[in-house]
Image (cartoon, rainbow, N blue to C red):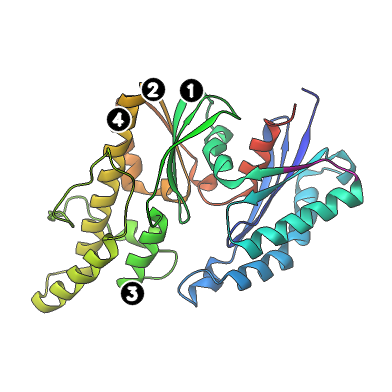
């Protein structure tokens, strides 16, 4: 493969990000989050997120080039997130990337957002094929069997809500600020004895499903408000997170045995969860979890994955 220097652009949701990767090695990455702004509305407002991308993309690229000491003429390719994501946000990134490509005659690489997450672990850890990949975020909950950078088989995805989306909804029910994942994780007390949130445990042979979890939390909160259980939010957060994370671990063990793999990669925003990371360490196989600074949406993973797609 010839020497490459790839500019990555990420605008799939509420994070504006650009990065430079030279020959599969990250030089630098800038992420500008609009989460604080979105928190005023209790979640992501697509139009607002798209306008923030328009505002910050060009200044971010200028800052990135200045920080790395890279000249624009040195950049060989432009990679951008093409799907999936919020349509307006994706369009901003796509138009910006295509404009740069046309103006500078640099090849364009359209990158799948989920596949970028899968290989984001490779930014700090070795990639060993084949492996099982779990992607868990505000938009995705899915398992893949990965044989190569282009041979990726979807084993299972969610039948309804994504796990990160449910975290945000439960946090809102508890009066916590967006994004909800970190807030619930901070309240979680693994030493507190709590019953199962639902009567039945998750069946690892069935698809991911979180449609009933919010209703269960609403009912639980009403019950607690009547009975007056101490530290209401801690109690609910602990019960909710234990049920959800224990279900993920059970699911992973099921597929590890079924596919007979000895290597697992875990990525996406929810991969930053402390309790999940502790439980993953107990699995009797090689588990690589994305570095926390790359667990959310970022352009480093976009450029890194694109660098492995160049022929």
Mark 2 in CB contact with mark 3 (< 8 angstroms):
no
Judged by depth in the image, the label closer to the viewer, 2 or 3, is: 2
In the rendered image, residue 173 lying in the magenta stretch gets the answer no
Q: Which residue is mark 1?
A: 130
Mark 3 or mark 1, which is nearer to you?
1
**Eye-nearest disc, 2 or 4:** 2
Query: Residue 152: x percent and y percent?
Result: 53, 32
Identify the element where label 1 is drawn.
loop
Q: Tag 3's secondary structure? A: loop
State the extent of the magenta-drawn residues as a range.
105-109
Which residue matches tag 2?
Answer: 261
Distance of mark 3 from mark 4, alpha carbons? 34 Å
30 with respect to 41 (left or right): right
For numbered disc 2, what is the local secondary structure?
loop
Which residue does the image show at 32% across and 65% down from the upper left? 170
Q: Are marks 3 and 1 in contact (CB under 8 Å)?
A: no
Quadrant where the image shows the N terminus: top right
Quadrant where the image shows the C terminus? top right
Q: Position of residue 119 (x, y in %)?
A: 55, 35
**Disc 2 to disc 4, how far (Cα)?**
12 Å
Question: For this rendering, which residue is in front, 255 or 298?
Answer: 255
**Which residue has dot 3 on it?**
175
Taking the image as shown, residue 246 lies to the left or right of residue 195, namely right
Q: Residues within 10 Å of mark 2 (few under 14, many from 20)?
A: some
Label 2 with label 1: CB-CB less than 8 Å = yes
Q: Nearer the viewer, mark 1 or mark 4?
A: 1
């Amino acid at each position: 493969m010839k020497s490459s220097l790839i500019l990555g652009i990420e605008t799939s949701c509420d994070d504006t990000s650009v990065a430079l990767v030279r020959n599969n090695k990250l030089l630098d990455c800038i992420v500008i989050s609009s989460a604080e702004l979105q928190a005023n509305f209790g979640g992501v407002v697509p139009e607002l997120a798209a306008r923030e991308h328009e505002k910050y993309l060009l200044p971010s690229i200028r800052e990135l080039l200045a920080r790395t000491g890279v000249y624009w003429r040195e950049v060989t390719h432009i990679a951008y997130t093409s799907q999936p994501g919020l349509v307006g946000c994706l369009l901003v990134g796509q138009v910006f990337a295509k404009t740069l490509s046309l103006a500078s005659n640099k090849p364009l690489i359209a990158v799948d957002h989920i596949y970028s997450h899968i290989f984001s672990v490779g930014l700090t850890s070795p990639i060993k094929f084949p492996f099982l990949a779990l992607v868990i975020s505000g938009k995705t909950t899915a398992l893949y069997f990965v044989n190569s950078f282009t041979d990726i088989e979807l084993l299972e995805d969610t039948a309804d809500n994504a796990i990160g989306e449910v975290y945000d909804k439960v946090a809102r029910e508890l009066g916590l600020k967006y994004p909800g994942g970190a807030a619930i994780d901070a309240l979680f007390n693994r030493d507190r004895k709590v019953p199962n949130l639902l009567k039945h445990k998750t069946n690892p042979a069935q698809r991911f499903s979180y449609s009933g979890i919010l209703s269960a939390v609403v009912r639980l909160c009403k019950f607690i408000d009547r009975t007056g259980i101490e530290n209401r939010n801690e109690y609910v957060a602990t019960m909710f997170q234990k049920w959800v994370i224990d279900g993920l671990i059970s699911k992973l063990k099921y597929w590890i045995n079924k596919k007979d793999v000895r290597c697992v990669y875990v990525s996406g925003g929810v991969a930053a969860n402390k309790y999940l990371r502790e439980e993953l360490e107990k699995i009797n196989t090689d588990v690589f979890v994305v570095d926390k600074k790359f667990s959310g949406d970022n352009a480093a993973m976009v450029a890194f994955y694109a660098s492995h797609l160049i022929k």
